[in-house]
Amino acid sequence: MRLPDQLRTLSFDLGTQVHADGSCLVRLGNTHVLCSASLEEKVPGWMKGKGQGWITAEYGMLPRSTHTRTDREAARGKQQGRTVEIQRLIGRSLRQAVDLQILGERQITLDCDVLNADGGTRCAAITGAWVALAIALKKANLSAALVRQVSAVSVGIVERGEGRRGSVLDLEYEEDHLAAVDCNLVAARQEDGGELELVEFQSTGEGRSFTKAEATALLDLGLAGCEQLKAAQREALR
């Protein structure tokens, strides 16, 4: 049985999409996300002439990534608010990884497609997208532009009836469904070392409010989880 401070079984399969500039399939338990990076020698029109690049992201869940089939958003004619929110989170998180001046007038699009969803899909997407991004930059001889390592993990306070489980790292769907407090944490570290810094810490009292002490405990647990993820990212790239 997984301990509350343990990640689910984690793996990265590199080069899953042979035509992408960088790609990996990240697995966290039964959450599987295919991440790819595409580098273009251009930037959006509003950025032309600024001498810097741009990182953007697209996110989607395949129709049978969940227990029941979900229509493709393209078939609906519009994206859901959740999808737009997650895309923006992935994009701004991964922009923290790159010196956009060194990148030059180039755009990298990170595509994150959820094959199986069992909780923490946005966090898995960010963690896998960083690996795909690192591969793409190395392939283009732009590794100098990669200045931070970025990873993300979910944490929460799970309470099950009279039995309180307390703080749990890397929530699967059932744990997330039962969580009284639900958080997503994105953290980054400079490539040359230093302290792990927060990029985002999204926390919500789903079933109840929570104390400052509980928030601090969740933050510490999430940062410890990101340390584990960063070690796995490095090992995968080696």
Image (cartoon, rainbow, N blue to C red):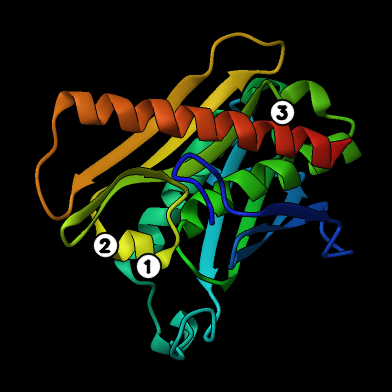
The residue depicted at 43 percent of the width and 49 percent of the height is: 88
Residue under label 2, please give it.
178
Dot 2 alpha-carbon crowd within 10 angstroms: few under 14, some 14 to 19, many 20 or more: some
Marks 2,1: beta carbons within 8 A? yes
Q: Position of residue 113 (x, y in %)?
A: 60, 67
Taking depth in this image into account, of 152 and 90 the one nearest to the observer is 152
Q: Position of residue 158 (x, y in %)?
A: 28, 52
Taking depth in this image into account, of 11 and 96 the one nearest to the observer is 11
Q: Position of residue 68 (x, y in %)?
A: 43, 90
Marks 1,3: beta carbons within 8 A? no
Per the rendering, the mark at residue 42 is none
Q: Amino acid at mark 2?
A: Leu
Q: Give the CA distance from mark 2 to mark 1.
A: 6 Å
Residue under label 1, please give it.
174
The residue depicted at 46 percent of the width and 56 percent of the height is: 120
Residue 100 shows in this picture: yes
Q: Amino acid at mark 1?
A: Glu
Query: In the displayed structure, does residue 11 sit left or right of residue 224?
Result: right
Task: Give the image quarter of residue 70.
Answer: bottom left
Query: In the displayed structure, does residue 14 sit left or right of residue 1?
Result: right
